[in-house]
Image (cartoon, rainbow, N blue to C red):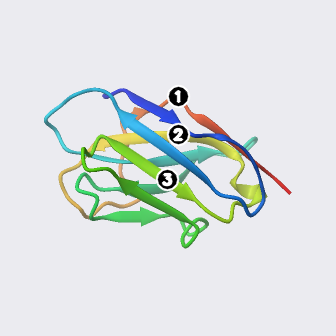
Amino acid sequence: QVQLVESGGGSVQAGDSLKLSCTKTTQTFARYAMGWYRQAPGKEREFVAVISWSGSGTDYADSVKGRFTLSRDDAQDTIHLQMNNLKDEDTAVYYCVATIFYSDDVHRRLDFGSWGQGTQVTVSS
C-alpha cells in the first residue's frame, strides 16, 4: 500500500467547477494506476475515474463522462480531477485510490488497494 494525500474539496454552486488533487507520497519503483471513488450520504461507494501510470489510459463513470477530466503530472505522482458543470448529485466524499498496474488499459474494475482519507465536495443549487 501507498500513502495518498488529497486536496481541493469544498462547497460550490451547481454549474461551478472544482479541482481535486491527489499525491502519492510513498516513493516506490512500481507503476501505479490512480483514480477516484466517491460516496454520497446513504449510498454505496462508487467508481468515478481512473488513469494509467503513464497518463495515456483513462476510464470514467458514465455519470461524469464529459464533465470530469482526470490528468496526471509529469512526475506521475500527482493526479488532478477537474470537475466542471457540477450537479447536486456530485455531492460526496471523494477518495483517491491507487493500485500497482503496468498497463495503460485501465478500467473501473481494478482492485484498488490504497485509499486516501477522503475530501468533501458539496454542490448546492
The residue identified by callout 1 is 117
Looking at the image, the residue that sits furthest to the right is 125
Mark closer to the chain start, 3 or 1? 3
Q: Distance between the Cα atoms at labels 2 and 1?
A: 7 Å
Above or below, comparing residue 67 to residue 18 in the picture: below
Give the secondary structure at mark 1.
Answer: loop
Q: Does the residue at mark 3 contact the one at mark 1 (Cβ under 8 Å)?
A: no
Horizontal relation, residue 84 to residue 103: left or right: right
Residue found 25% across the figure and 50% down from its top: 74
For this view, does 60 lie left or right of residue 64? left
Which residue is located at x 44 percent, y 58 percent? 70
Nearer to us of marks 3 and 1 is 3
Secondary element type, mark 3: strand
Instruction: Tell me which amino acid carries mark 2.
Output: Tyr
Q: Secondary structure at mark 2?
A: strand
Quarter where residue 89 is shown? bottom right
C-alpha span from label 2 to label 3: 11 Å
The C terminus appears in which quarter of the rendering? Answer: bottom right
Figure quadrant of the N terminus: top left
Q: Which residue is mark 2?
A: 95
Q: Residues within 10 Å of mark 1 (few under 14, many from 20)?
A: few
CB atoms at circles 2 and 1 under 8 Å apart?
A: yes
Q: Position of residue 71 (x, y in %)?
A: 39, 57
Q: Earlier in the sequence, mark 2 or mark 1?
A: 2
Q: Say which residue appears at 69% left-offset and 60% top-offset.
A: 86
Residue pointed to by mark 3: 81
